[in-house]
Image: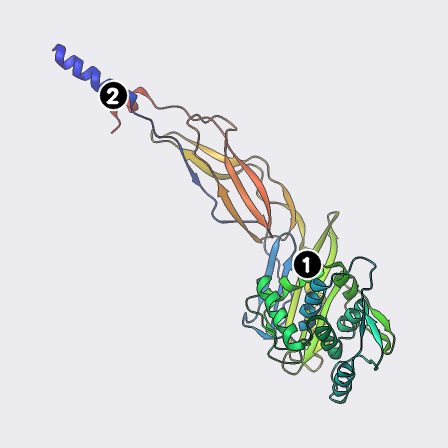
Amino acid sequence: MVLVLVLVGVLVGLQWSRPIPGPVFHPSVSDSIRLSGTSPSLPWPATGSAALSMEGVGTLGHVGSTKPVPIASITKVMTAYVVLKDHPLSAGATGPDIPVTAAVVADYQAGLASQQSVVQVSAGESLTELQTLEALLIPSGNDIATMLADWDAGSTTAFIAKMNSAAQTLGLHSTHFDDVSGLDPGSVSTPTDLIRLGEAAMALPAFSQTVDLGEITLPEAGLVYNFDYDLGRDGIIGIKTGTDAAAGGCFLFEAQNTVDGKKVTIVGVVLGQQTSSPITAVLSSAEGLAGAAFADMANLPLVAPGQLMGKVTTPWGASVAVRAPHAPSVIGWPGISLPAQLDVPTVPHVVGTKTSIGVLKVNLDGRIVDIALRASGSLHGPSVIWRLTRF
């Protein structure tokens, strides 16, 4: 009898001293969250392709093919980007003088004869770097693209290699350039890639200040106007139009507006508008997209206050809800999905009300916002019977 009691005592001691498994978190959120509300519809073009993105939030959608297509003079955005990365211009600076060579004059004359988009130049003339960028981006001079390429890299061939290298560096994996002006239909891209290129170019002050100009005056060409007639409409501040037979009408644009006291920026692109008036078609489409996007933006919480984010359970059957007591708000678009990632370390053995369980990290177009996850109550420990009878 004594031996039995001893054995029972030993077994009870061993069972009681066994490590107790800790609580486990079971999330009710996956790899994304969705802002509250019904997704508004946008006036997408019926043909071609288009995309729209909100800086600091992410994509608002896209339509049409995702295959690379000719982009006409939008190519000049990359031309300007490469030049400014190689030869930066500070605010108010005009940069060095660039001589107009005989080759540039010949390029101008050939382009004029074939009815290309060119800017008048003459032998012996010089333009500052800023003036060449203005002549490239405002009246869209094909001859100026060649002039800048030769000045920067010694030849258009060498400069095109720089353009394609820059595309890879920016992550534009569906983009390829065969020329510096976009006249060659082999210069192709996609709406998603072009939005990224537009964001990178507009981050350069000399570029963003140039494309917002409605007109410029050049030494030989005189007063010339921007083909972007949308400037100032629905907050549009650039970026570049383009049109030819292969590409149709194309427009890469940026617009800014104030929503709930905060400045909001969107970048969009419309490609492949094969109409009798392609530039009018893309400008009208961009204006409609920008106006509709801003109209539907609102200050929205990332998650509802107190929203259930999961629960913590124990092997002995106790559980407690995990919630987000507070969540920051963002200027966003109803119904948009945002990437998110849970960061939950080992759950502590003792869980009380407001115990930190982890963090939900929401990706706002590269900016990470943390939402704290906390227990909404306490967990009781295991009973004596459970500890002695578990297996």
Q: Locate residue 194, reporting x and y percent.
A: 63, 66
The residue at the far top in this view is 2
Q: Locate residue 18, reporting x and y percent.
A: 29, 24
Q: Locate residue 56, reporting x and y percent.
A: 64, 52
Nearer to us in this view, 364 or 310: 364
- Which is in the foreground here, disc 2 or disc 1? 2
| Disc number for residue 266 | 1
Seen in the image, is 117 located left or right of residue 309?
A: right
Quadrant, the N terminus: top left
Nearer to us in this view, 185 or 297: 185
Relative to 49, does residue 335 appear above or below in the rendering?
Answer: above
Residue hosting label 2 = 14
The structure residue drawn at horizontal position 73% and vertical position 63%, both measured from the top left corner, is 87
Amino acid type, callout 1 = Ile
The structure residue drawn at horizontal position 55% and vertical position 71%, both measured from the top left corner, is 65
The residue at the far bottom in this view is 113
Nearer to us in this view, 345 or 91: 91
Amino acid type, callout 2 = Leu
Seen in the image, is 321 located left or right of residue 35?
A: left
Relative to 245, does residue 217 appear above or below in the rendering?
Answer: above
Q: Marks 2 and 1: CB-CB under 8 Å?
A: no
